[in-house]
Image (cartoon, helix red, strand yellow):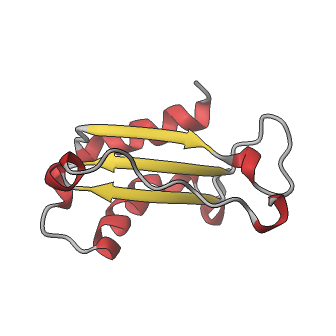
Amino acid sequence: MTNTTTALQSAMASLSPTHLTLENESHMHAGYFEGKESHFKLVIVSQAFDGLRLAARHQKVYAEVAPYLTANGGTVHALAIHAYTPDEWAGMTQAPDSPLCASRR
């Protein structure tokens, strides 16, 4: 596991996830260099999202990962967030696939 992956996963601990997957999808994007960690897909399931609309869920996640985003001097350029409540997740088999970068199709 890489430093960025570990840091992002640790940042999510405050939301007490019952399920968490974090996938480095940098290789799917233009300008990818081996080992670069700039694009991630996060699937997080937490009771903390109960009663919240999608935007509020994303705001909770962004508040935790802010130090790692490029806008704040970090290395993460893009974070695809799939945030679910435990009840929503129970009815799913998996999160949606991420699209390929336009220049990688």
Provide residue 37's location: percent of width, then percent of height: 69, 43
Give the side of residue 84 with respect to residue 78, left or right.
left
**Residue at 24% across, 74% down:** 53
Residue at the image position 36 percent from the left and 44 percent from the top:
12
Residue 39 drawn at (x, y percent):
65, 52
Identify the residue at image location x=40%, y=43%: 11
Please state which of residues 77 and 30 is positioned toward the viewer in this rendering. Answer: 30
> Which image quadrant for residue 78?
bottom right
Residue 97: image location, x then y, percent = 53, 54
Give the left or right position of residue 40, taking residue 81 as reference. Answer: right
Decide: is 98 above or below 102. above
**Image quadrant where one finds the N terminus:** top right
Relative height, residue 47 to residue 3 (above, below): below
Quadrant into which the C terminus falls:
bottom right
Residue 9 lies left or right of residue 50; in this view the side is: right
Residue at position x 59%, y 38% from top?
4
In the current view of this chain or complex, which residue is farthest to the top? 1
From the viewer's perspective, tell me whether residue 2 is left or right of residue 100.
Answer: left
Q: Which corner quadrant of the image does residue 54 belong to?
A: bottom left
